[in-house]
Amino acid sequence: MVLLVLLRAIIGPTVLDRLISINAITSKVSVIILLIAFVRKEYGFIDIAFVFMLCAFVSGLWILKALTPGDWQLRLPGVKGFEGDREGEVADG
């Protein structure tokens, strides 16, 4: 399964396809680490899997920010105050 997802990461036409493939691979590797911890009854591997998942999450965010254009501002259509503009503010003083 990991090889099929790796093939998708290589072929994937967009950055998001590749990022989702890499996240799927890290999830599968984390499950393998957790299964090894269960079988060997060495529960220190759980910490390793947890750190691995956290590193994968942070690196996925970094890849997404580095490879996708945009200013990364929160935009909620229909909700004022989240667009980054200062139209609705009242000056104090």
Image (spheres, rainbow, N blue to C red):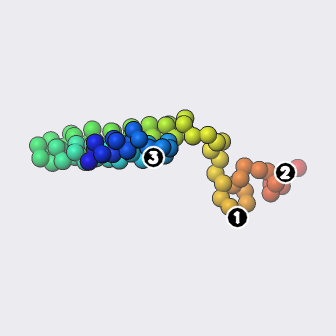
Q: In the rendered image, which residue does mark 2 sit on? A: 92
Depth order, front residue of 8/36: 8
Q: In the rendered image, which residue does mark 3 sit on? A: 17
Q: Position of residue 83 (x, y in %)?
A: 71, 53
User: Which numbered disc, 2 or 3, marks the residue that appears first in the sequence?
Assistant: 3
Mark 1 Cα shell of 10 Å, populated few (<14), some (14-19), many (≥20): few
The amino acid type found where label 3 is placed reads: Asp
The amino acid type found where label 1 is placed reads: Gly
Q: Is residue 57 visible?
A: no
Using the rendered view, name the quadrant where residue 48 is placed. top left
Q: In the rendered image, which residue does mark 1 sit on? A: 78
The reply to whether the C-beta atoms of the residues labelled 3 and 1 are less than 8 Å apart is: no
Residue at 61% of width from left, 40% of height from top? 69
Using the rendered view, name the quadrant where residue 82 is placed. bottom right
How much space separates mark 3 and mark 1, taking CA atoms? 29 Å
Residue at 22% of width from left, 45% of height from top? 32
User: Which numbered disc, 2 or 1, marks the residue that appears first in the sequence?
Assistant: 1
Q: Secondary structure at mark 2?
A: loop
